[in-house]
Image: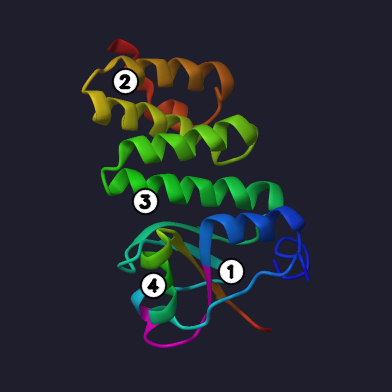
Amino acid sequence: MDTVTYPHEKVAAFFKKNLIPLRIQFDTKPYCNEFNVTWTPTLIVLDADGKEHHRTVGFLSAEELIPALLLGMAKTRFEQQKYTEALSVITELLDNYAKSDAAPEALFLKGVAQYKNTHNPKPLKEAYEQLLAQYPASEWTKRAYPYRLL
Amino acid sequence: MANTITWETEMKKALAQSRAQDKQVLLDFFNPG
């Protein structure tokens, strides 16, 4: 990450705009135990209370790191029931990183966040249909499979 | 340098910045090698 991903201009700009970057050596107590760190790099998105909302383990290129972090930011807002903010981040992810590994989960989360925000089940079915069309082999398409019946 | 990430190294300070700036924290557990 230090030699390839973090020096990338887009990554540095993304961090500066969107996140508070915190670096802790993998064996630092009590944090390595509290977060059950077993491999590096382990990247975790936290809210201001220190609560974990998303993690990735292993190397990510710049093209994959930014959408992975956007997904983490969206999941934080979703889990805080800030659905409009979550949807804004998801839109940024899907508009700019539709081919990334994080995109199918983001599309799934979009449908769920829209449903939670409106209690209208239609976005769930739309999410499944879009997943099937754009990411037919994704696990998130399989997870959305029941929504086809809505 | 434009391409340098400024890392916080203390959890308490990072969480305080998170609250003040309404930004989430990206915690990187790293191995210095």
**Range of the magenta residues?**
A21-33
A11 to B25, vertically: above or below: above
**Distance CA(mark 1)–CA(mark 4):** 20 Å
Pointer 2 or 3: first along the chain? 3
- Disc 1 to disc 3, C-alpha distance: 20 Å
Mark 4 crowd level (few <14, some 14–19, many ≥20, 10 Å Cα): many
Seen as rendered, the residue at the extreme bottom is: A29
Q: Chain of mark 1?
A: A
Identify the residue position indicated by label 3 in the image. Answer: A76
Residue at the spot x=44%, y=59% of the render? B23
A120, A48: nearer the viewer: A48
Tell me whether marks 2 and 4 sit on the same chain: no
- Real-space Cα separation, disc 1 to disc 2, in angstroms: 35 Å
Front-most of residues A69 and A101: A69
- From mark 2 to mark 4, how far is it between C-alphas? 39 Å
Which residue is nearer to you in this view: A137 or A52?
A52
Residue B19 location in percent, x, y?
36, 66
The answer as to whether the residues below labels 1 and 2 share one chain is yes
Residue shown at 45%/15% (left/top)? Answer: A129
Q: Which residue is mark 4?
A: B15
Q: Pointer 1 and pointer 4: residues touching (CB < 8 Å)?
A: no
For badge 4, the amino acid type reads: Leu
Q: CA distance from mark 2 to mark 3?
A: 25 Å
Of the two numbered discs 1 and 3 on the same chain, state the one appearing first in sequence: 1
Quarter location, residue A122 = top left
